[in-house]
Amino acid sequence: MEKIDRIILGSNAFEGVGYLSRAQTQHYLEFFSKKENILPIMEASFNLGIKSFMCSNNSNILQALGEFTNSRDLSILAVVPNAYEYARESTEKGVLGTILSKAKEIDLYRKVRMGLRALRKIQGIITKDLLTLLTNLMDFEMASFHSHNVTGIILHGQVTDLALSSNNREIFDVYQDLVRERYAVQPILATHNFGTLLPKLMEWNIKMPILASFNKKGFIMKPSQEECERLLANSDYYVIAKKVLAGGRLNPEEAFPYLADKNIGSVVLGVGSLSEAYHTLSVAKSVFSKP
Amino acid sequence: MSQQEKRKVGIIGFGKSGILHASSVNMNPDAEWRAVCDADEQVRDIIHAIYPDISVFSDVEEMLEKVSLDTIFICTPDHTHLPLAKQLIHKDVNIFVENPLAESLAPAQEMVRLASDNTKVYSVGFYSPFKAVLRKARDLFENGILDRVKRYRASLQYSLPRSLPSRERITRIRASAFLYLIYWFFGPVKSVYAKAGDKFTASKSGASLILDHSSGLLGIADLSWDRPGYPQPAAKITIEGTGGTLDISEDNLKLYLTKKKGEFARGWTSFQRADLPSPERFFLCEEGNYEGTSSFLESCSGKKQSPLSWEDGLEIIRMIEAADLAIDTDREISLHEVK
């Protein structure tokens, strides 16, 4: 497995995702619609020694990344697909309709710009349609990151959880093989259902790092906080914790000690302002950088 | 639960809500998703690829003939609900219909009439009761935390591109879900007065409703569907009582009390989603999706009563029709007039 940094800067706030109130979401959407407001936070984080950044292909973030002086030294964990984009479009076409139209839209692009590479191993195990669909979608999403140092690809939690509920291991096999063979980076699964996903992956003998909610309040830890903690304690999977501040309900001083003694490899921290970045990331460094 | 006792589920329509129900059913130990019917050939092909064990059909009748099913989720546009209900109602199946119940009053009334002759469970897809903050707020309200309730003010804001062909349909779905939230909190409405227009942006894309409830409570509801910066719908309710106020949204709840009451001190107490227990065992895209499906399945198994009936769906459509009529005639409309 590729090494993943202990502390990762998240991008939820930059994408207008907040859990405290609609006013906060509204503020994030407006404030971070300007790349000038994203850049200082990225710089502060980088200067504090946080060299990993997790984000989707949101256009504001990509613009900020494009102007970020140290972007070559930044390790990007790309989240695919850009679920919020799909959610907006799917009000009109439905989810599958949106995926289908995207797939059609990008097919030509893929052929012209990227060419077709053989994926013999995968082609042997799944239907051609599904492989083509997933390959097209992945290429489309990843094209935005072509000039960045992508070290891992994270399957969005909504997609992982839908795939998990399909009980179809092929989807997970295809995903990890695609990421490893086509992009030569680390595949990672995000989920809101750690307690269901982990046993399933173990049963299928599929091993990938998992990005899952872990926080003192049990916020979105499914099926329950106790079950997630029990599985985590006995797991040999690499786990990246998200929602560690319980959607903004905990401050770093009370949130991080809960994680520090758990079997957690990395933490993702989203911040919504420059002062928050200095505070949250400094506390994180003092807690998580201990040997 | 043995294989025989499991609910045998079919899904009609595999758009967003069809996918969510199918996924929820798949994760429910008391149910088994067996078949799906969708008119789109490409969608059917993808279902085949992702769910190789599921029987896929383009025709509802064929699905019912070939697969043994006892529970159906109708996830197609509202104008198809009555024709499908007519097809299904005599097949001895439980039926879940996505919100709104039907496209207008007459088909909704017909659906309720059809259902009244049968003993199966007929439910409609409203999700407010499955969201932790809203549930907590309603518990507090029901238990009289505000003493005598004076009035409430509710709002729903979102923005939809004007070019969106389904703008009207989506608006109707969202308005219906919002009015259900009001109905769930404050009970049936006696009369409605309504004006077209958006209170927030002064555009015409909205409406303001004065709702007179059977309980004697009066409330105002403002709807805006062109509010810039609101890509996702935001619903809010403020309830004023003699003992204080409740500010409610899906994300948080703020309670203000004029004097200490039970465990709550005088002044402000706030709850966020993260503070409240969530019974949901699986999280699918949004809070309440899995529990909404599971709750219906449990009521089909007789484990509990369905919290959402087709009668509730009809009541919401009557409120919408009354509001439309009030806007057209510029007068207060009693729900008795909406027949």
Image (spheres, rainbow, N blue to C red):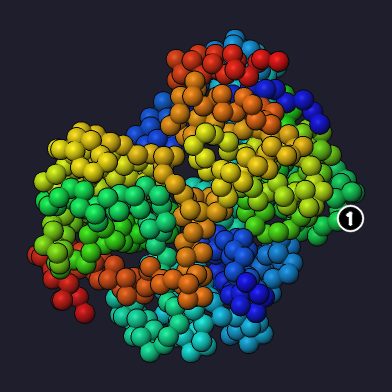
Amino acid tagged 1? Gly
In the rendered view of the protein, which quadrant contains the C terminus of chain B?
A: bottom left
- Give the quarter of the image for residue B77: bottom left
Q: Residue at x 13, y 58 (%)?
A: B217
Q: Residue at x 17, y 72 (%)?
A: B335
Up-down relation of residue A222 to residue B303 (above or below): above
Where is residue B207 shown, x and y percent of the image?
Answer: 22, 54
Up-down relation of residue B151 to residue B87 (above or below): above
- Give the quarter of the image for residue B216: bottom left
* Near-viewer residue (A38 or A237): A237
Where is residue B329 shown, x and y percent of the image?
Answer: 12, 66
Give the SS element for disc 1.
Answer: loop
Up-down relation of residue A207 to residue A171 (above or below): above
Q: Residues within 10 Å of mark 1 (few under 14, many from 20)?
A: few
Residue B288 visible here:
yes
**Horizontal side of residue B209 vs B42, given as left or right:** left
